[in-house]
Image (spheres, coloured by chain):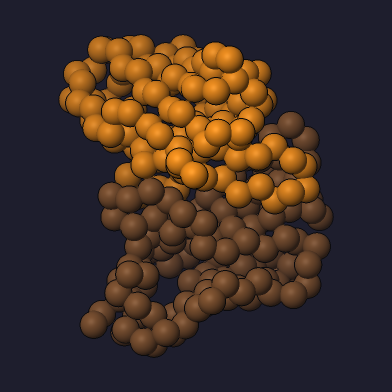
Chain colours: A orange, B brown
Amino acid sequence: EAGVAQSPRYKIIEKRQSVAFWCNPISGHATLYWYQQILGQGPKLLIQFQNNGVVDDSQLPKDRFSAERLKGVDSTLKIQPAKLEDSAVYLCASSLPQKGHGGEQYFGPGTRLTVT
Amino acid sequence: AQTVTQSQPEMSVQEAETVTLSCTYDTSESDYYLFWYKQPPSRQMILVIRQEAYKQQNATENRFSVNFQKAAKSFSLKISDSQLGDAAMYFCAYRSDYGGSQGNLIFGKGTKLSVKP
């Protein structure tokens, strides 16, 4: 079974530039998550999708971050314009959606973003 | 809002010895899940062990076991017979079983575990 795929693995940009990250979840996983992990901290949820609908984006800085999940499969996360404090690893995860299932989240390798 | 606290930024253990990583959490909910995730350097996060709050029995997975104290809101991870490959960041995480964000994991800041040969 293929795992969660993410690209690119590394990205360096200058502040005020834009960047996009791509995620392909495990086949059949309806729920997809984007987390931001700043160095020395645990991951923090940015946005959660159920199929192609947003379940929770309360911690997404909507003035600069946007995300979409077309056709309920792949997802892209965009930052425009980037700030220095956006330097972090962006993790994508997917899971089965059943309530009470305790559904394990499977994580991708992450994209390490450096904003200079 | 739920919070997860890991009070040990770093821990060290001798190979083949046992180590315990601490985690406390705060919630007003009665149904939830607790997890320990392992994140090796430059590698992706993987699930180590899971505990359902309604289960009194502590979860075990081979050399990994937890001490779940629901009343005290404590969830520690014990690694027995530590191996060099256990060296990693370990994150404690909470997952609600309520509402639309029921899948959302809330992580602690992590504990960096070093294993000495």
Most foreground residue, B24 or A108: A108
User: Looking at the image, is A35 positioned above or below residue B57?
Assistant: above
Horizontal side, residue B22 vs residue B14: left or right: right
Question: In x, y percent, where is residue B103?
Answer: 66, 40
Residue A99 location, quadrant: top right
User: Looking at the image, is B72 positioned above or below residue B35?
Assistant: below
Question: In x, y percent, where is residue B54?
Answer: 80, 62
Question: In x, y percent, where is residue A12?
Answer: 20, 26
Question: In x, y percent, where is residue B13?
Answer: 34, 80
Horizontal side, residue A93 vs residue B111: left or right: right
Horizontal side, residue B87 vs residue B28: left or right: left
Q: Quadrant of the C terminus of chain B?
A: bottom left
The number of callouts visible is 0
User: Looking at the image, is B108 positioned above or below residue A96?
Assistant: below
Residue at the farthest bottom position: B17
Residue at 64% in and 58% down: B34
Q: Quadrant of the N terminus of chain B?
A: top right
Most foreground residue, B39 or B5: B39
Most foreground residue, A33 or A106: A106
Most foreground residue, A65 or B85: B85
Asked if residue B67 can be seen in this view, the reply is yes
Residue at 44% in and 80% down: B19
